[in-house]
Image (cartoon, coloured by chain):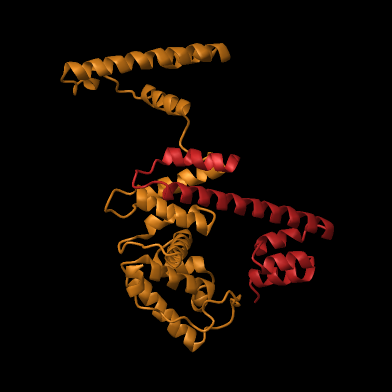
Amino acid sequence: MLTSQVKRQRRIERRCIPAVAVALHAGQISPRTADAFLRLTPEEQAQELSRRLSEAHERETQHRLVAEAIRTYLDSLNGQHVDLVELSQIIKKALAA
Amino acid sequence: MAIFAQLPVIAPLPQAASLEIVSASSPLTTQEKVRLGQLVRTIERGLSTFLEVAKCLQEIRSSRLYRGTHTDFQSWCRETLGLARSSVDGLIRSGEVAQLLIERGATLPPNTSEAVIRPLASLPSPELQSEAWRLSSLVAPEGKAPSHTVTAKVSRMIREATEGESKRALPTRELMFTRPISRLAKIDSFDVNVCLLHVKSQEQAENISHACGVVADRCKAIQAKLDERFPDAHLAGQTSAQD
C-alpha cells in the first residue's frame, strides 16, 4: 500500500514542469503546493511559481528588516527598559521605509 | 544551553533523521522495534525538559515508527500518550525552535518549558524567533527567565507590527465598551444595594459616581447614534425590557 505522500510525490514528478520540481527539492515550495500546481497548464504553473517565489522573497526581506530593527533597538538600549510600543512603531517605520 | 547540553544523548538511527518517506505497510525491523521502545520509554519518563521528548516524538513521526501497531500518528498519540496529535505537533515545533535558539547561541534557563517557547514558534523565520527570544529575555523581570506571558506578548507585538492586526488581535475599544454593557444588561438579579455593599469610603463613592456618570453619558450617545441608524431599535429595546 502506498501512502498518500508517496503517491503525491510520484504524481508531482510525473506531471509538473522542471522548475516546480527544482523549487520543491530546494524546499522553496511544499509538496502540497506543488501538487496543487498540477491542475494548471505548464504556462500557468510557471507564472504561479514565479509569483509565489517573489512573494516568498518579499516576506523573507520583510522578516530580515524586522529582525534588523529589533537588533538595532536592543543594541541601542544601554541598560534602559524595553518599550514594546516604541519598538512596534520602529518596526512599522522600518517596514514602511 | 546548560541543561540541554547535560541531557543524555539518544543516538539517532542511521536513517532516523532522514526525510525519506517510509511506506505505511513495511513491517518494523528488529532495530526499529528496539528504537521505538527506547523512544517511548524516554517520553514516558516525563523528563524535566521537553527538548528530548520533542526529539523522540519527531523521530517516531518522521520514521513512522508507530506503524507496527497503529495506522496513523494521530491514533498512536491518542492511545499511547493520551495526547491529541495537535498537542504533539506543537511540542515538536517548540522543540525545534528551542534547538534552533541553542544553535544560534541563546541560553535557555534550565526550567524552560514548552509553553514558554510555544509562542515563538508562531513567528515566521528563525531569525525573528531568535530576536524575539532575546527581546523576551530583556522584557522579563530582572533575574527571572522569560515566562509564557512574556514570550506570547513579544511574539504578538512582532506579528502585529509585521502583518498588521490579525483577526485574533485584542478587540477594538468600541467592542470593549459595548460588550460589557450588553453583558451587564443581561444580569437579571440587579440590586443597587448589593452593588454598593463594598463601598466604604467617600473616595470610593466619588469614583463610582463619576464612572456611572461617564458610562451613562456614553450609553446615551450610543443610543442616539443607534436611533439615527436604526430608527426602530429603541422600540425593540423597550418591548424586551417590558417582557
Quadrant in which the C terminus of chain B appears: top left
From the top left corner, tell me how far across and down residue B164 is, in percent: 55, 40
Q: Is residue B208 left or right of residue B214?
A: left
From the top left corner, tell me how far across and down residue A3 is, in percent: 63, 72
From the top left corner, tell me how far across and down residue B99 is, in percent: 44, 66
From the top left corner, tell me how far across and down residue B187 is, in percent: 34, 24
> Outermost residue toward the left?
B200
User: Is B82 in front, or is A30?
Assistant: A30
Q: Relative to B188, say whether B47 is above or below.
A: below
User: Is B190 in front, or is A16?
Assistant: A16
Decide if residue B148 is in sight here: no
> Outermost residue toward the bottom?
B30
* Mark count: 0
Q: Colour of chain A?
A: red
Decide if residue B223 is in sight here: yes
Quadrant in which the N terminus of chain B appears: bottom left
Q: Is residue B202 left or right of residue A87?
A: left
Q: Colour of chain B?
A: orange
Q: Is residue B79 left or right of residue B61?
A: left
> Would you identify the image quadrant in which residue A9 lies?
bottom right
Residue located at (43% from left, 56% from top) = B118
Residue located at (53% from left, 69% from top) = B72
Residue located at (38% from left, 22% from top) = B185
User: Is B73 in front, or is B31?
Assistant: B31
Q: Relative to A55, say whether A89 is above or below.
A: above
